[in-house]
Image (spheres, rainbow, N blue to C red):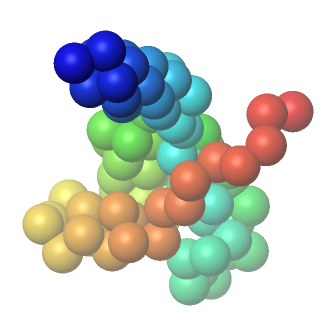
Amino acid sequence: MISLIKVDDLIKSKEVKKSMTKRMVADCRKFPSEKNCDVYMSGSEEHVLEAAVQHAVGSHGHKDTPELRKQIREMMTEETAQV
Ligand SMILES: [Zn+2]
C-alpha cells in the first residue's frame, strides 16, 4: 500500500509541474508570409492560440476560421528554454 501511495504522489506532482511550466510558442516565421513577419508569441496554449489568431487576422488579413486555428495549433511548439 505504501508503494502505491508513493507512485500516486509522484504522478500528481509531475502533473502539477507540467501544467505550471508548459508554455507554447507560435513563431510567425514558420508561417508562410509575404511580409517576412517575425512575431514570436509564447504563453499557455490557449492564450497563444488566441493571440496568434488575432495577429493572423489583424496583420496578415487571414479569416478567423477553424482551419486557420488548426494550422496555428499545428505549428505551435512547446517552449523548451526559459530566457
Ligand atoms: Zn505575423
Residue 60 point in image, percent of width and height: 47, 65
Extreme-left residue of the structure: 66
Answer left or right for 32 relative to 19: right
Residue in the picture at 50% in, 23% down = 17
Q: How many numbered marks does the figure carry?
A: 0
Residue 45 point in image, percent of width and height: 39, 42
Residue 66 sits in quarter? bottom left
Residue 21 at least partly seen: yes
**Viewer-closest of 81 and 53:** 81
In the rendered view, would you say 65 is above or below 17? below
Residue 71 sits in quarter? bottom left
Residue in the picture at 18% in, 75% down = 67
**Viewer-closest of 30 and 65:** 30
Residue in the picture at 71% in, 49% down = 80
Residue 26 point in image, percent of width and height: 55, 55
Extreme-front residue of the structure: 1
Residue in the picture at 79% in, 43% down = 81
Q: Quadrant of the N terminus?
A: top left
Q: Quadrant of the C terminus?
A: top right
Extreme-right residue of the structure: 83
Answer left or right for 70 relative to 12: left
In the rendered view, would you say 4 is above or below 58? above
In the rendered view, would you say 68 is above or below 18? below
**Viewer-closest of 7 and 41:** 7
Residue 16 at least partly seen: no
